[in-house]
Image: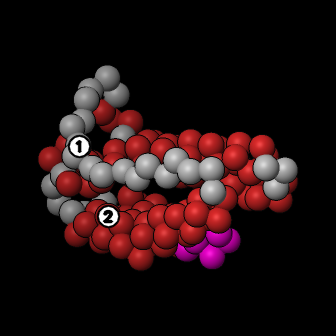
Amino acid sequence: MIALKDSITKENLLRAFAGECQAWRRYELAAGQAKAQSLQVLYWIFHYTGGQEKEHAEVFYNHLKEFNGQEISICADYPVDNSSNILELLQLAAQREAAEHDTIYKSFGDKAKEEGFPGIANSFHMIAEIESVHSQRF
């Protein structure tokens, strides 16, 4: 087993944290669009899902406690879904959530397991399953 400080898992945790924070904010922005268009049910779907993304971010961030006060450098791509078209926002949300489930968090979890971090692997795999539910919701 390698130390977390020397692992790819450390970087994946920060990528996941940043991605979940961005998803939370994107959903809050989409909720605002829905509310402005008097689409209350969609407002609540975006808002509720955004709250869950915020909680996912916290799970990933808590795994990084040993790095308190340090900086971790990552390179990652994050989407810009800045549209007033609610149908487009729903479709993009479904695609983003499916990617987290199908590819991103599964691979992060597999890497964490390979590197000897079963608890972190479990977090990635568990949240991947929740992202599948989010994708279906949208």
Query: Neighbour class for label 2 at 10 Å: few (<14), some, many (≥20)?
Result: many
Which image quarter is the C terminus in?
A: bottom right
Which image quarter is the N terminus in?
A: bottom left
Residue 11's place in the image compared with 115, above or below, is above
Q: Which residues are magenta?
A: 132-138
Give how far across and how far down residue 120 sits, in percent.
38, 58
Secondary structure under badge 2?
helix
User: Image check: 118 left or right of 52?
Assistant: left
For the stretch drawn in magenta, the main secondary structure is: helix
Identify which residue, 96 or 80, lies in the foreground. 80
- Res 42 visible: yes
User: Image check: 47 left or right of 98?
Assistant: right
Please state which amino acid type lies under the numbered disc 2: Phe
Q: Residue at x 63, y 76 (%)?
A: 136
Secondary structure under badge 1?
loop
Which of the two discs, 1 and 2, sits closer to the camera? 1
Q: Residue at x 48, y 44 (%)?
A: 22
- Res 128 visible: no
User: Image check: 19 left or right of 116?
Assistant: right
Mark 1 / mark 2, whichever is N-terminal: 1
Quadrant housing residue 29: top right
Residue 84 has which mark? none
Give how far across and how far down residue 94 sits, in percent.
56, 69
Quadrant housing residue 113: bottom left
Q: Is residue 117 magenta?
A: no
The residue that label 2 is drawn on is: 108
Give how far across and how far down residue 88 sits, in percent.
58, 63
Q: Residue at x 71, y 43 (%)?
A: 32
User: Image check: 127 left or right of 33?
Assistant: left
Residue 69's place in the image compared with 25, above or below, is above
- Calculate the distance from the C-alpha at mark 1 to the C-alpha at mark 2: 14 Å
The residue that label 1 is drawn on is: 74
